[in-house]
Amino acid sequence: MRKTLQAYDDDISFFEKVYQVVRLIPKGRVTSYGAIAAYLGSAQSSRMVGWALNGSHKVRPKVPAHRVVNRNGLLTGKHFFGGQNVMQHLLEKEGIKVDADKIVDFKKHFWNPAVELKL
């Protein structure tokens, strides 16, 4: 069963659209900044997705930003989680193995919003 964005429209900010997509990533799965940007129709905006997630710890409802990594499965945003290994710990609690700051079996855990979600 596919999920959809509940409030996807032109009246909400790019950051809020990012948060909505990230909230739909299932536990035990990860996606990339670029995959979110492409899904939102702005493929060149992966850094903007990162900026949105950098401040997401203040956003409610909660945004599981730990499930977003770079295109190679690296935990590039880990320093925004308040501790050196917090992001890794959160992922491992969901059953995702991390070795040397990289998702083990990244393709297996990858969740592609373009495939999983529909507008």
Image (spheres, grey):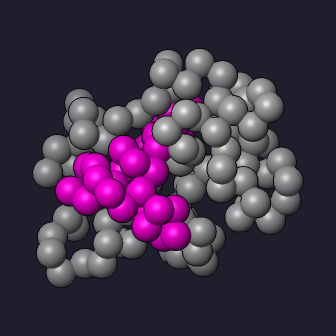
Q: Quadrant of residue 73?
A: top right
The stretch of residues the image draws in magenta is: 23-52
Q: Is residue 54 left or right of residue 86?
A: left
Q: Which residue corresponds to the image point at 32% horizontal and 72% vertical from the top-left?
A: 14
Which residue is nearer to you in this view: 101 or 1? 101
Which residue is nearer to you in this view: 61 or 65? 65
Q: Is residue 39 magenta?
A: yes
Task: Please say whether residue 73 is visible from this viewpoint.
Answer: yes
Q: Is residue 30 above or below residue 55?
A: above
How far across and how far down the image is residue 64, in percent? 56, 54
Screen quadrant of the N terminus: top left
How far across and how far down the image is residue 53, in percent? 53, 65
Q: Quadrant of residue 104?
A: top right
Task: Please say whether residue 93 is visible from this viewpoint.
Answer: no
Q: Is residue 35 above or below residue 98?
A: below
How far across and how far down the image is residue 55, in percent? 58, 74
Q: Is residue 90 left or right of residue 36?
A: right
Q: Is residue 43 magenta?
A: yes
